[in-house]
Amino acid sequence: MQNVKKINQVTYSKIFFYFFICFAVSVSILFFSLSFGGKFINPFEFFSSDSAVFMSLRLPRVLADFMVGAGLSIVGCSFQTFFRNPLADPFILGIAGAAAVGVAFSLFLGVSGFIPTQILSLSFALVTIFFVYWVAGGLSSVTANSLILVGVGLNFFFTSIITFFNSVLSESFTKDLLMWYLGSTVFLDLNIVFISLLIVAVLSVILYMQSGKLNVYLLGESFAVNSGVSIKQFSLIIYITGSLITSVSVALCGAIGFVGIIIPHIVKIIAGLDHRLNMILCFFAGGSFLVIIDTFFKTVFFPYEVPIGAVTAIIGTPFFIYILRRRI
Amino acid sequence: MNIDLSNVKLGYNTGFTLDIDKFVFHSKLITGILGPNGSGKSTLLKLISGIIDSPAGIIIAGGRDIKTLSKAELARCISYVPPQLDNFPMIRVFNLLEAGRYPYSLGFGILDKKDNEKINEALEICDLTEKRDLFLNQLSSGELQRALIAKAIAQDTEIVLMDEPFSNLDPKFTLKIIEIIESIKKNKTIIIAVHDVNIAHYLCDKLVGLKSGRLYFEFDNRSEFDVEKINSLYEVNFRHMDGNVVLDFK
């Protein structure tokens, strides 16, 4: 009798099971993706044959793909619930816009090199996070509604700055900025990618700790309060960790859309609304998805580079429509 | 647990203010709150349950000021049954009750043996054992109301606040809810915001009338029940008939 009553119930062993399966599958996908590219490298010869290509091109690229996909997807998953909006994605609070303005400034000032650009765009994003929080706190207490209002408002402001730059400055500048916006994980330094992946992973764990609260929050704010959730503290953690993950991936790889909004939807349709499980799935599915897409396009179109932000939707949307059709 | 209110004041910018000098809700009794729409019944329940932070005044539950309690501590001593759900996510009845055990968990809301017992017990009391794995949108409104009450029962608090638990229910479900409330009454402080004067008359040990945010009357026991005061509260005519209180349509 007791056993029968446990169907649909989440237990620690179920969480660990999900985690290890997802982890194992993702690691194997990552591992085999390293073989593909301009030239096939046998997995047994990763470090012996052409280690320069491997260490400075393939490994950082695959890790960056995974970091961006995993980070944006888990943030999208929590933001959709937190803002009670199926259209909420990691960029809804103006962070991508702020990072783009940072990039525009670095191009405008003629700052050369990859790292200064990233640092400038990260700083713009970080300042925006605190600015949005400060303004939202001034409206009333900081809630999902006040945050989204300020964020969306600010996003228009940034878009308008970018448009201004685009219309005033030269064509090459416009193209550079557009290419950045479409997102790319090429030519990244392995150390930087590694550190960012670590930061995103740690922040994702903090975000995942809120999964129990997100479950209760699904039923409404007053319902959550009466189930023992402190909305103030919960909102702060979701907002800050989500925004930080977004800032890191945007500053490093540009505004790669789609993963942050559609992957969470696909996962929720398949795995249900329990965040203790679907956030794990989002993290690994989002990461693996981007790795597969990027590997596929860089192999098929070699030697041409297709910006990953531009092509994720080409594969992803038909799949999403298939899932929706099957479900409805 | 008694609930002591003193100098509780809350103003909305619409001009409405809730203003209660002193009032005590006693334990082991069902107290009904009567009052016209907008008289502050729901606001009062939300203040006590900590859903609205009280800007002025002191609310003491079981000897402790609720402002000094964390939300989890508060949720372990007070449960609140909303009139309906604000959101209708695709989750199962069981998940709704799981939320009632959340304040006892370590943050992830993973249930232990005791949690499962409480949930099964609550499902049984509310006649929902069969519906445990249905999605919320598959329930009738009577079943949903019972599921919301079951969540509060699973939460196992000494104080239970109910906001209009009889709204949108047919007579049979109304009787079922009354039966459930009477069966959990022992050792609990129950406060119900209610519109139906006849139900209030039958079910509640004590009654409070609220009008424009102020106390209008208190009936400390059933014998004090005074139809005239209720008539002037609602500005209509009720009369006694065979032990029931019925509304005069003329």
Image (cartoon, rainbow, N blue to C red):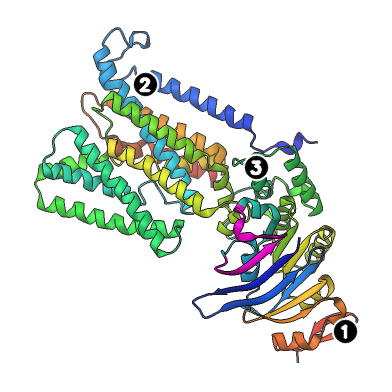
Q: Position of residue A64 (x, y in %)?
A: 33, 29
Instruction: Name the disc covering residue A33, or none.
Output: 2
Q: The C terminus of chain B is located in which quarter?
A: bottom right
Could you confirm whether marks 2 and 3 are on the same chain?
Answer: no
As for residue A290 lying within the magenta part, the answer is no
Rendered image quadrant of residue A33: top left
Q: Position of residue A271 (x, y in %)?
A: 55, 38
**Chain for disc number 3:** B
Name the residue located 37 percent from the left edge and 12 percent from the top edge.
A43
Q: Quadrant of residue A193?
A: top left
Nearer mark to the viewer, of 1 and 2: 1
Task: Give the SS element for disc 1.
Answer: strand
Q: Secondary structure at mark 2?
A: helix
Q: Chain of mark 2?
A: A
Q: Is residue B68 magenta?
A: yes
Measured along the vertical axis of the image, is residue A5 above or below residue B223?
A: above
* Of B70 and A289, the residue lying toward us: B70
- Where does label 3 land, which residue? B105
Q: Residue at x 34, y 28 (%)?
A: A195
Task: State how far apart marks 1 and 2 are (Cα).
Answer: 81 Å
Residue matched to label 1: B241
The disc labelled 1 sits on which kind of residue?
Met
Please tell me whether mark 1 or mark 3 is closer to you in this view: 3
Please provide the residue range marked out in magenta. B54-71
As displayed, is residue A83 above or below residue B112?
Answer: below
Q: A173 or A296: which is nearer to us?
A: A173
